Image (cartoon, grey):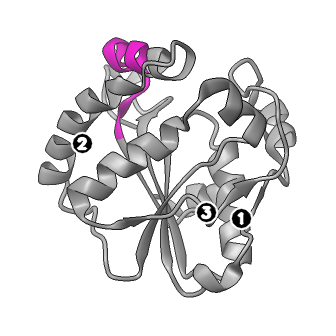
Amino acid sequence: MCLPCQNESQLDSLFALTAYQNPLLKNMLHNLKYNFASNITDAFALLLNLFFDEQKTFTVNKNCILVPIPLHKKRFAERGFNQSKLIGDRISQILQVQTNSELLVRVRNTKSQMTLNKKERLLNIKNSFVCPDPNQVKNKDIILVDDVLTTGATIKEASLALKKAGCRSVSAFVLAKEGLINPNNNGRIN
């Protein structure tokens, strides 16, 4: 990540499996989140295996913990699962690294970010996360796991909460990132 992106996102690094413009992945993610098709993570496991086999810059160490972006308890009750946790569990199996969904809690029940612009997303998600036990993240390397990164507002707030709690670094892994491919750049990756 370039320095301005690091400063804006509060992340040390960001990894994305693919662009959100990928119609197949977009459809799979929509079915996972809104049609409650949690078994789609089986297909993601295949893609994740390929990604981690080929991506040599993504490394984990003994201080590394995967932390799925949490849902508010009301949203969790509606959906019955947290898609970020399902993705994190798949990554954990592949990389043999610990996942802990207790290290970050969503304390505000925000409205869906899907229809909001960047400014509205930043305001909507502000102060939504806390780390209930800073001792568990102190001097740890955290990798946040989420399904999609569009404006980065959710990842930024989660990263701020973890850094405030004393972790050493915060990176993020997302299945898809909006704007990864610039349509004005002949489809090349930004």
- Residue at point 14%, 42% (across, down): 50
Residue type at tag 3? Glu
Residue 186 spot, x, y in % from top left: 31, 19
**Residue 139 occupies quadrant:** bottom right
Residue located beneath label 1 in the image: 160
Disc 3 crowd, CA 10 A, few/some/many (<14, 14-19, 20+): few
Tell me what residue is drawn at x 18 percent, y 35 percent. 46
Dot placed on the residue nearer the N-terminal end, 1 or 2: 2
Depth order, front residue of 4/65: 65
Residue located beneath label 2 in the image: 48
Q: Single out the mark in the foreground, 1 or 2.
A: 2
Q: Which residues are magenta?
A: 17-28
- Say if 177 sits above or below 79 in the image: below
Q: Is residue 188 left or right of residue 1?
A: left
Q: Amino acid at mark 2?
A: Leu
- Residue 38 highlighted magenta (yes or no): no
Q: CA distance from mark 1 to mark 3?
A: 16 Å
Give, as a three-letter code, the residue at label 1: Leu
The image shows residue 65 at horizontal and vertical percentages of 44, 69
Question: Which one is nearer the viewer's eye here, 59 or 30?
Answer: 30
Gap in angstroms between the C-alphas marked 1 and 2:
27 Å
- Which disc is residue 102 wearing? 3
Q: Which residue is rendered at x = 50% and y = 42% of the image?
A: 84
| Residue plotted at (25% across, 65% down) | 96
